[in-house]
Amino acid sequence: MDGSQPFFALVVFIVCYFLLSSLKGKTANRSYKGPAIYPIVGSAYEIATNRNRFLEWLTETLQKMPTKTFVTKRPGGTMDVCTADPANVEYMLITNFENYPKGERFTFLLHDFLGRGFFNADGELWKMQRKTASYEFNTKSLRSFVVETVQWEIRNRLVPVLSSASKTGRSLDLQDVLQRFGFDNICRVAFGVDTACLLPSMPTSPFAEAFHDATDLSAGRFMYAVPFLWRVKRMLNIGSEKRLRRALKVVDEFASEVVSSRRKQISVECLERNDLLSRFIAVLIDNSNRFDKEVYFEDDKKLSGTIDTFLKEMVVSFFLAGRDSTSVALTWFFWLLTCYPRVEESIHSEILQILAKRLQPTTADEEGISFSFEEFKDMQYLHAALCESMRLYPPVPVDTKYVSRDDVLPDGTCVKKGWNLSYSSYAMGRMENIWGSDCLQFKPERWLENGEFVGENPCKFPVFHAGPRVCLGKEMAFIQMKSVVASIMHGFRIKVADGIRCPDYVLSLTMRMRGGLPVTVACR
């Protein structure tokens, strides 16, 4: 926490304390179901006091609501609605999609970090990016490139690090290892760049550290009980906003260099490349006139400069998707295996059964083992276990939309233009009315029918979103996660240092473990 944060927190607490002391039980607005809404401060007091256990507070509050929906009010009058009702989720993500965009608040808070990249875009700009990305993500050549790249990273980076740790007996932070793996992998898949962050020496990366800070500090803007305080800090260039500005400078320079370097290489070499950045560059250059006039140009800037800006913002968005989401999901997954050794043994047995079908005998070696795309499809129990893990610990625990027009949700909740509407994947995974009385148990079998994986309604399990904004990288994510899990479990045993104690989390744009996941590694 930076030096100015305690001061602002103290001021907010004192103001709220004295206001609530005189108002409590007398003037609280109970016209909406949920946390009390007081004059001036709204729901700021309750939000502030639950800041360090925000997801638990959301879950507990939603569980108490008959409709699994509640309303809060921020200082300044902004109303926030949060739901864990699958019918509401389907309505906002699919049925009435156009009425619930990202919205000005979301895009404004993250604009310094993500610009107008696809995670932070609405309207025609988002549709253009989505159309381009959708075509590229559905090509067989990209899928093959992803499988090849992931397997290379495992053989040449991940396995040597784990082998070294098993021989020396030293502890590893598995979350850090997986983040480095994800970072190197997305750099190769998306940009054709080898950053070599995952080596036995665990080298430091100024960009990776800056990106880490930029992610957390940008997400922190959403958590202010008094929304305008971060703007004051940015204006004065103090505290977290000063740190964010420094981090963004490093991120911007790295992304600009990646784009500039790749464009020069394509221009000079005239070679077709498989990475996503090269594919996007080719598409944008081929469609530059349409791109110029209809979507991206807002003035008379040169086309090349405009494309570079767009590509730079795309680079940052891909970093966010590829570095954090899968590594966060895998970190919680390996911790859960410690708590449920039966599940670990079932996954290992499935891997051995798949390997036994090969015509040539398979043995573990220093380079690890590779799997084909068809073999990934046969990993039904592993697929179910990964989904079950993300049900309980979704990489992105809360998603927020903006209400464009007055509306009524399926559960009868009225929402007004300008309000914010969120759903919590974390809370939904803990709802008995959705998953049954055993909803808190890690139970992959709930996803299986006669040994075959059976998917759930994405609005009941919105980890990969749903509707027009459903995650295009879902298949890529499962390829990466299955590759990592199968390779690690075939060659190593992972033991969590702190045993089954439930780790705390850092609530950022993704739900990382606070303090990492210390483990010891042993060869099987």
Image: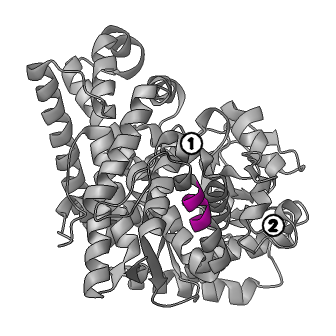
Query: SS of the residue at dot 2?
Result: loop
Residue 447 visible in the displayed image: yes
What number is the disc on residue 192?
Answer: none
Query: SS of the residue at dot 1?
Result: loop
The kind of residue tagged 1 is Lys
The quadrant of the image that shows the N terminus is bottom left
Span shown in magenta: 347-353
User: Which scheme is used to colour this image of the protein?
Assistant: one colour
From the viewer's perspective, is residue 265 above or below residue 370? above
**Image-based side of 390 in relation to 3, left or right:** right
Name the residue: 42% across, 58% down.
324
Prevalent SS, magenta region:
helix
Q: Which residue is mark 2?
A: 431
- Label 1 vs label 2: CA separation? 26 Å
Measured from the top left, where is residue 290 in percent x and y? Answer: 38, 10
Name the residue: 35% across, 41% down.
148
Among the 4 quarters of the image, the one containing residue 218: bottom left
Of mark 1 and mark 2, the one earlier in the sequence is 1
From the viewer's perspective, is residue 136 above or below residue 337? above
**Image-based side of 332 in relation to 110, left or right:** right
Q: Residues within 10 Å of mark 2 (few under 14, many from 20)?
A: many
What number is the disc on residue 102?
Answer: 1
Q: Tell whether label 2 touches label 1 (CB within 8 Å).
A: no
Identify which residue, 216 or 261, lies in the foreground.
261
**Image-based side of 344 in relation to 161, left or right:** right
Name the residue: 85% across, 68% down.
432
**Callout in the foreground (1, 2):** 2
From the viewer's perspective, is residue 81 above or below residue 490? above
Measured from the top left, where is residue 262 in percent x and y? Answer: 17, 32
Q: Residues within 10 Å of mark 1 (few under 14, many from 20)?
A: many
